[in-house]
Amino acid sequence: MTKLCLAGFCFLFIANAGAAQLKVLSAEELKAKVVEITTAQNQVMLKGSAQADVDKLFALYSDDFVYRHDAYGGNYSKEQLYANTLRLLAMGKYDKTGPRYRILSQIPGYNAVAVERQEVHKGVVKNHLAVFEFRQDKVTTIIEYWK
């Protein structure tokens, strides 16, 4: 009987620990996270941004984060993207005077959000579709669907 009680307790402990790790973000939480990430992305691309801005953005990404944009190069791990971002920052490539993206709409789902963002580049307005996937309060994947 003692072994059975101990086994039951262990099962409940493991089940509760697993459930705690599988938190589903509400629609409001998901939308707020997309705004936070977009704001941080925009900040990095502004003239005068610094490594602290890059670090703030990448703190929003999970350790196993992947950025996917098939039309422009494929898949990038967090490490690859971080190194590329710092390299471009050091080269002075981030020189925007205003935000790159403006969020037009969001469709939240199960720990993911489809996002329509607008970019004005050299006077040309383009709308972009991206999907942000989350685990806990970190984005795990951003997939871009535009060219």
Image (tube, rainbow, N blue to C red):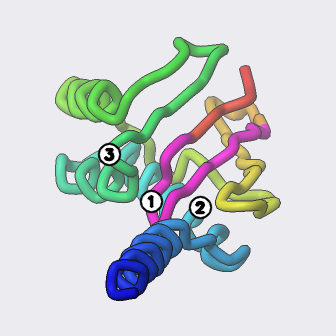
The picture quadrant where one finds residue 24 is bottom right
Quadrant that contains the N terminus:
bottom left
- Estimate the x, y position of residue 121 in percent, counting from the top left: 63, 33
Mark 3, secondary structure of its residue: strand
Residue at 27% across / 54% down in the picture?
A: 53
- To which residue does mark 2 refer? 34
Give the overall secondary structure of the magenta segment.
Answer: strand
Q: Which residue is mark 3?
A: 63
Dividing the picture into quadrants, the one containing residue 64 is top left
Tag 1 and tag 3, C-beta contact below 8 Å: no
Sequence-wise first label, 1 or 2: 2
| Marks 1 and 2 in Cβ contact (< 8 Å) | no
Residue beneath the point at 78% across and 61% down:
109
90 to 42, vertically: above or below: above
Q: Quadrant of residue 141?
A: top right
Q: Is residue 53 left or right of residue 29?
A: left
Locate the C terminus and report the quarter of the image it occupies.
Answer: top right
The residue type indicated by label 1 comes to Lys
Residue underneath mark 1: 138
Determine if the magenta segment contains residue 104.
no
In the drawing, what numbered circle is on residue 67? none
Q: CA distance from mark 1 to mark 3?
A: 9 Å
Mark 1 or 3 closer to N-term?
A: 3
Position of residue 38 measured from the top left corner of the image (x, y, whole percent): 53, 56
Name the amino acid type tagged 2.
Val
Residue 48: percent from the left, percent from the top?
25, 48
Closer mark to the observer between disc 2 and disc 3: 3
Relative to 37, residue 145 above or below: above
Q: Answer left or right for 85 relative to 76.
A: left
User: Magenta region: which residues?
Assistant: 127-141
